[in-house]
Image (spheres, coloured by chain):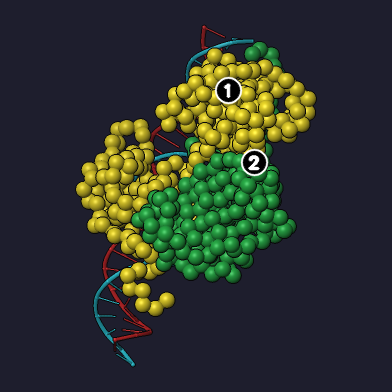
Chain colours: A yellow, B green, C red, D cyan
DNA sequence: GAAAACCGATTGTCTGGACAATCTGATGTC
DNA sequence: GACATCAGATTGTCCAGACAATCGGTTTTC
């Protein structure tokens, strides 16, 4: 603990606090229906993403920022807070608000595999293998909160990228929630359909595991028997807490991995 | 779409809006150093957890609540907002704030496997297999942001529950960050050690995949060759954005699965 | 020279109020 | 009876200001 002069305060890379960024023409449009704090948050976010606000930069104190923009301090704070929640900024009392040294991208959203692939430019295709109703198994009944044996909708899909199978998706949904149009299911994700039907997704519970492929599964996914598969079971709830979907999916481990970002809540 | 009187509004379980909960003796202690909004948030949270605020219950409007507690509305809003962020409450303009129908437990924290197991009452044990320094491989160097070949700390541990191996954990850390005491590593988690050394964890990037076990890996984890393994690679960053840890772990898929809750950001 | 006290800067907490936007249910109209 | 309109309730946004807590560096003191 004595005489390690090159490394200040237990670190190895001194954070250089740049001078406050007084430039960066920020402005708000009071005639817009978009909330002021949100306008500001978006401008700051895009400035950070585009590098106009370099990592480590101090934002300048809230009071000045507010008066410069003609806003009140609570409004500016609300904007900043939303970016802190996203992990883009860090506040330090007595010091200021600093741009995080990046690396954070997306804090794990509930997006469908379809959206994920589309965002990655993989041009996903979907083949609907099944779209009907069946009596709920014990597993499905427990997840959806219905009686065992009650009719539920079931959809099985094969997801492909560049013509190669990548995942087998099986979803169970309670009846009466929405119409599952087979054609629509081939061109968009399930979650998008659900949101479009007025279902407000709220939370989900996921379990990710692995196992080896059976001969049947191997054939479906073009993998040899015994190869590694990623499994994912997910129950999704709407904002009233009722289950709206139960998924039981398998992915080719040779082609796919779950990739996500997460934030530490302070 | 006509005459399905039992199912209102596309649903199958009517959310019953109980009368506002005017009881539930809430109170704040102004002499306490704990922020008022936080006191209120904690009381509401415990009331929800203990079922004193049943799922679906309306909270009663913010103005009344504020005047009843002798607080201002922004303070009450701040308390409620923190619980909305946690997924325990849902706000609806023109309607009120409602307790979510439960199901949400933990929105995926950055906890170590050790903590997870301990919370599950698994009484984990750790065997430190390696604790030294080595030159960084290309993979490690890229993750930690150091030059390839530079010395970094490396720790390999075997995690056991009830005497059975469950996971093999390999971590690389930059030098100078903290002292890695082998004895401490056997009795607590790595993240706890890091936090104790003044490192403020901020975010992490994870990749979860799967593969089949090699003969060597099988022997280490008491699994036959070719059995399925879950793999997890994680880079953790502190709040200045510098990487503080890179982990490359394998888990016995027959014994372990990742289990987490996630919230949809509105 | 080293430790303690001080001070300016900045964010954290809190107040009291105002108006807007949205939802629900009741009322009225055709 | 079906549809449009209205009113009340509730959350969403915004303001101007006050004081407290904390951080970092400076000054003072020993």
Q: Left or right of A9: which side holds A258?
A: right
Where residue B105 sits in the image (x, y, percent)? 62, 46
Q: Quadrant of residue B15?
A: top right
- Give B16 or A21, whichever is nearer the viewer: A21
Q: Is residue B48 visible?
A: no
Q: Chain of mark 2?
A: B
Q: Residues within 10 Å of mark 2 (few under 14, many from 20)?
A: some
Q: How many marks?
A: 2
Q: Chain of mark 1?
A: A
Disc 1 to disc 2, how far (Cα)?
26 Å
Q: What residue sits right under mark 1 in the picture?
A: A158
Q: Secondary structure at mark 1?
A: strand
Q: Quadrant of residue A240?
A: top right
Residue A112's place in the image compared with B51, above or below, is above
Q: Is residue B1 visible?
A: yes
Q: Left or right of A38: which side holds B73?
A: right
Q: Residue at x 54, y 47 (%)?
A: B232
Q: Residue at x 26, y 57 (%)?
A: A18
Q: Secondary structure at mark 2?
A: loop
Where residue A48 sits in the image (x, y, percent)? 32, 45
Where residue B43 sits in the image (x, y, percent)? 61, 55
Q: What residue sits right under mark 2 in the picture?
A: B226
- Give B48 or B261, whichever is nearer the viewer: B261
- Give A178 or A141, whichever is nearer the viewer: A141
Q: Quadrant of the N terminus of chain A?
A: bottom left
Q: Left or right of B112: which side holds A70?
A: left
Residue A180's place in the image compared with B127, above or below, is above
């Amino acid at each position: 603990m004595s005489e390690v002069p090159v490394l200040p305060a237990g670190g190895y890379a001194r954070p250089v606090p740049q001078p406050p960024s007084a430039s960066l023409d920020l402005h708000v449009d009071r005639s817009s229906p978009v909330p002021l704090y949100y306008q500001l948050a978006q401008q700051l976010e895009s400035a950070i993403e585009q590098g106009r606000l370099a990592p480590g930069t101090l934002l300048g104190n809230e009071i000045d920022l507010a008066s410069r923009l003609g806003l009140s301090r609570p409004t500016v704070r609300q904007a900043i807070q939303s970016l802190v929640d996203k992990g883009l900024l860090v506040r330090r009392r007595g010091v200021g608000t600093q741009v995080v040294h990046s690396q954070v991208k997306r804090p794990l959203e509930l997006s469908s595999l379809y959206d994920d692939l589309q965002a990655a430019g993989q041009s996903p295709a979907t083949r609907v293998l099944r779209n009907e109703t069946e009596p709920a198994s014990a597993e499905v009944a427990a997840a959806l909160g219905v009686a065992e044996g009650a009719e539920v909708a079931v959809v099985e899909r094969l997801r492909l990228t560049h013509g190669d199978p990548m995942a087998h998706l099986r979803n169970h949904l309670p009846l009466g929630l929405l119409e599952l149009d087979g054609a629509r299911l081939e061109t968009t994700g399930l979650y998008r359909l659900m949101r479009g039907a007025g279902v407000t997704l709220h939370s989900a519970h996921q379990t990710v595991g692995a196992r080896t492929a059976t001969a049947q599964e191997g054939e479906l996914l073009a993998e040899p028997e015994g190869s590694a598969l990623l499994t994912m079971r997910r129950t999704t709830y709407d904002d009233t807490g009722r289950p709206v979907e139960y998924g039981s999916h398998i992915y080719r481990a040779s082609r796919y991995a779950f990739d996500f970002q997460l934030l530490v809540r302070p």
